[in-house]
């Protein structure tokens, strides 16, 4: 399928037609594709778009929760937003529109490394797509795209529990106001399109946990999980 036809199918799926197709192309371009096709003019991947999309998603989600749950406190809103914008949830959203099928990958990345199905890749692409819609049409089209995903899953998330490892650790630490929790990136390994990040989490100057992941968020969650185990707040065999 040509790029133009693929764009058309995706636009039908997301119910938004781009004025600037270049923005959509960037949102769908994995860094591995740029690495192999720079001589053909592909020099911009979706990494910068992901950064902007993450912020836009956070604002849309926060506004929705603020207006929907008027009787809930800040802690509930924070935990619920974290669950709605986490990697696992965004990957679910991306799979609903088969986003991985439209992405541009370098040779072998999509198949050998499972790129089209990797949660971190899908989550990043979903955020990049939000950014592309925002840059092309503004905040209202971005909201129109994002809100159906959020509303479809928010009640289920609340019923099943919204607290991820980072949120749970933060809640425990906040019981003692003078304690400071920090996450530190200590290493990045692998090629640019297939990074493995290593994080450490500290309580004041004390190391509580270490974790690795294919995204910074995944590595932070892994380090928070280890910290919870160390503090006796989580069983080592818990998922």
Image (spheres, rainbow, N blue to C red):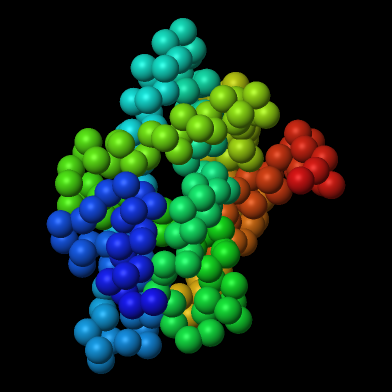
Q: Is residue 208 left or right of residue 192?
A: right
Q: What is the count of numbered marks? A: 0
Image position, residue 216 (x, y; %): 50, 57
Image position, residue 127 (x, y; %): 38, 52
- Outermost residue, bottom direction? 39
Camera sees residue 46: no
Closer to the camera, 72 or 95? 95
Which quadrant is home to the N terminus? bottom left
Residue found 38% across the figure and 19% down from its top:
66
Residue found 71% across the figure and 48% down from its top:
226
Q: Is residue 143 left or right of residue 199?
A: left
Residue found 28% across the figure and 68% down from its top:
25
Among the 4 quarters of the image, the one containing residue 157: top right
Looking at the image, residue 121 lies above or below residue 223: below
Residue found 41% across the figure and 69% down from its top:
103
Closer to the camera, 135 or 221? 135
Looking at the image, residue 171 lies above or below residue 213: above
- Outermost residue, top direction? 71
Image position, residue 201 (x, y; %): 58, 48
Camera sees residue 194: yes
Image position, residue 60 (x, y; %): 33, 33
Looking at the image, residue 212 lies above or below residue 232: below
């Amino acid at each position: 399928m040509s790029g133009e036809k693929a764009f058309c199918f995706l636009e039908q799926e997301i119910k938004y037609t781009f004025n600037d197709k270049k923005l959509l192309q960037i949102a769908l371009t994995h860094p591995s594709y740029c690495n192999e096709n720079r001589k053909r003019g592909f020099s911009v991947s979706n990494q910068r778009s992901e950064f902007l999309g993450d912020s836009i998603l956070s604002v849309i989600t926060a506004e929705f929760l603020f207006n929907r749950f008027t009787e809930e406190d800040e802690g509930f809103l924070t935990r619920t937003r974290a669950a709605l914008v986490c990697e696992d949830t965004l990957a679910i959203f991306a799979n609903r529109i088969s986003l991985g099928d439209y992405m541009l990958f370098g040779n072998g990345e999509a198949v050998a490394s499972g790129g089209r199905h990797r949660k971190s890749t899908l989550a990043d692409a979903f955020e990049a797509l939000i950014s592309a819609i925002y840059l092309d049409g503004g905040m209202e089209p971005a909201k129109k795209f994002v809100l159906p995903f959020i509303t479809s899953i928010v009640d289920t998330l609340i019923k099943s529990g919204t607290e991820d490892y980072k949120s749970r650790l933060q809640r425990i630490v906040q019981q003692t106001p003078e304690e400071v929790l920090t996450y530190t990136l200590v290493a990045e390994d692998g090629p640019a399109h297939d990074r493995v990040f290593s994080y450490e989490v500290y309580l004041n100057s004390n190391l509580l946990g270490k974790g690795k992941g294919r995204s910074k968020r995944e590595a932070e969650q892994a380090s928070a999980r280890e910290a919870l185990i160390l503090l006796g707040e989580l069983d080592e065999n818990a998922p």
